[in-house]
Amino acid sequence: MTAALFDSSNGAVVVAIVAAAIYVTVLYVAVAFWMVRDARRRSESFFFAVFAALLGLALPFLGVLIYMVVRPPRTLDEERALLLEEQALTEEELVEHPSSRPCPTCGRDIEQEFVICPYCRTQFARRCHSCGKWLRLGWQVCPYCAEEVGVQSFGRPGRAASS
Ligand SMILES: [Zn+2]
Ligand SMILES: [Zn+2]
């Protein structure tokens, strides 16, 4: 009686168990395989890939959850794209602000083209009293209209022009 029961209905159960075991095993290997591949995409370290493999094989299905927590947040490709983006931004900034220099009075960074320090109001340029263009303080003659403008020292706007 028990043997008959085993033969007829348990045969199907065994098949189902074997099928489930194969299914779980395939899934288990596939998950571990995915973890290793993902680890290699996220890290150049060989040991991290080994760690992922061990985690996937030692702790079936639980390992992948742990792996998701500890893995690097970005893949190497994403990291590279981010780096390029940052570089592009920095270059853009350099183009926008071609050169800066410290203000001789207050020492803060100001753009080379500034004619006056926005922080301490030190003047670096003055207007040509003949043509109205901005001139550097060190210039003795206006390069636009050839007007003699004399030498003016830093921070004392308008003195040379009036004298
Ligand atoms: Zn200043
Ligand atoms: Zn001029």
Image (cartoon, helix red, strand yellow):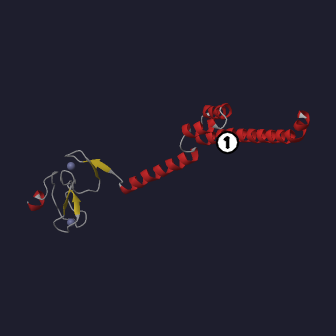
Against 104, residue 141 (above or below) is below
Observer-nearest of 68 and 49: 68
Against 6, residue 134 (above or below) is below
Against 19, residue 152 (above or below) is below
Q: Which quadrant, please, contains the C terminus? A: bottom left
Q: Amino acid at mark 1?
A: Trp
Does residue 72 appear to the left or right of 9 in the view shown? left
Residue 34 position, x and y percent, is 67, 42
Observer-nearest of 103 and 156: 103
Residue for point 21% across, 46% down: 104
Q: Is residue 43 visible?
A: no
**Residue furthest to the left:** 163
Residue 77 position, x and y percent, is 58, 47
Residue 65 position, x and y percent, is 59, 39
Residue 125 position, x and y percent, is 21, 57
Residue that numbered label 1 is attached to: 34
The verdict on label 1 being within 8 Å of ligand 1 is: no
Q: In the structure shown, which secondary structural element does the residue marked by tag 1 occupy?
A: helix
Q: Residues within 10 Å of mark 1 (few under 14, many from 20)?
A: some
Point out the quarter of the image occupied by ligand 2: bottom left
Find residue 149 and report its image quarter. Answer: bottom left
Observer-nearest of 19 and 84: 19
